[in-house]
Amino acid sequence: MKYALFKFLLNLALVRVSGKNQHMSSLSNEKGESHLSQTKLHEDKIQQSEAKHIQSIEPLTHDEFKNLYLPQKLPFKISGGIKNWKALSLWSPKYLGDILSEENVRVAISDKSIISYDGRHGSNLRFDEMKMSEAASLILNNKKSDRKYYIIHQPLADYHSILYDHFDIPIWGDKSKSYQINLWFGEAGNITPLHFDSTHNFLAQVYGRKFIKLYSPEDSAFLYPTYDQQLSNHSKILDIDHPDYSLFPEFKKAKAYDCLLEPGDVLFIPSGWWHQVHSLDISISINFWWRATLDECLLPHVTKYTIRHLYETRNLEEVNNIFDLNQFKNNLELARYLSKINHKWLSILFGMDFLESSLSKKNCEGITYDKDESGQIFLEKNIEIICSKFNYNKMDVLEWITNTKLAKKEDDSLLTSVDVERMLDKISLFESLN
Ligand SMILES: O=C(O)CCC(=O)C(=O)O
């Protein structure tokens, strides 16, 4: 009952709010006049936003997050969630430039404020290595309209440990899950274009403000993911604030949510939620990416991008760094679970990965395989030797190769559950060998 009431209140919080936006903090930074006029422009933009605001809540406990909020799979803002961080009073562009002055940093340099990471749309994005003192000075003093500087997802672990005294590791995620902690530091006006991440995320705002637009995974079909052309987690629509509806007519159906993030606030972005991030001021943020469980992230666009991509690059073992799969002993056990919940194409890819990696493991030493970068070709080329050594029937192995080709079409209706189970049963020969 209590839970139902909570859910109702949470949904209520996503109601459309028109007119004036949330309270804006007074601003001060080293950019002066030109910055103020830019700020005005940005504030007009926020007020014109037709999106629904995401829910904003007071700081919460680990248990409240885990038991009440995380299961909702909705983004929300923790207002003042990091208000006790020393970084809030200490960090500024100048401070980072001074304290990390001699540290090397990788700076994204774009000729447009929308930073097109994957090089589409003719963007001239490049990354330059420089000292932090130089980067901070460029970010503070840049007057060129065709040049934007942004330090993006710079791992904080690379830097001075003193910075770690200035912030706390979020209490909301599970302690057993380690965070990837990154610094984002850049100019006002920078826009990280619409994309999703496979991990969950706490985006903590230390300095300046950011305006974030979010879209549900359920609206992915309206957001034109790029993974059919290239395996990327971005949208084909580069500028969602001025979309070309003749190219992207479905985008009209996508429901936008928005969030203004001010210093001290934290935005929780669940795995798979699409987001565009607009720096309204010179901005410093820290984000914490952390692994979602399989059940939290079994979303078509996430699996298509992440799992298919890792399989294609022969790197499916890496999947455990992105999703929390610790409950599974190996990829065969995971494949069985996926088959049970009717995710057939994913089950085949994990099952095949188990077979291919088992074949190359120690107990198969003594066999000289014809090596090839692609799993399918590896099996095809070595079919005779594999069948004779492991007593497999050639027709079965050929069927698995066919199943894998079908699995790569990412369409569960092309595969039958019986075929998938039969294949996993036979591959399980390796469970006893491993
Ligand atoms: O702050 C930004 O510009 C982008 C942040 C982001 O995309 C993320 O934290 O996943």
Image (tube, rainbow, N blue to C red):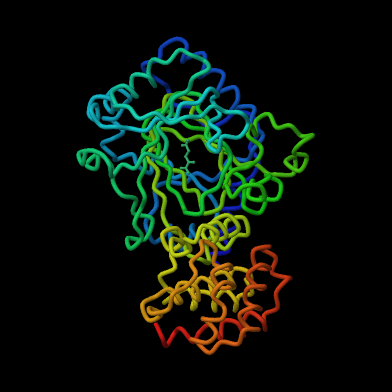
Measuring from the top left, give residue 263's x and y in whole percent: 39, 33
Most distant residue in the bottom direction: 391
Q: Which of these two is toward me, 95 or 29?
A: 95
Left or right of 87 in this view: 6: right
* In this view, 238 is above or below 378: above
Left or right of 360 in this view: 415: right
Which quadrant holds the N terminus? bottom right
* In this view, 350 is above or below 44: below
Which residue corresponds to the image point at 33% horizontal and 54% vertical from the top-left? 171
Measuring from the top left, give residue 403's x and y in whole percent: 66, 73
* In this view, 399 is above or below 56: below
* Image-quadrant location for residue 300: bottom right
Quick check: can you spot residue 328? Answer: no
Which residue corresponds to the image point at 55% horizontal and 56% vertical from the top-left? 309
Which residue corresponds to the image point at 39% horizontal and 82% vertical from the top-left? 434
Most distant residue in the left direction: 162
Measuring from the top left, give residue 206's x and y in whole percent: 36, 34
Q: Which of these two is toward me, 143 or 253?
A: 143
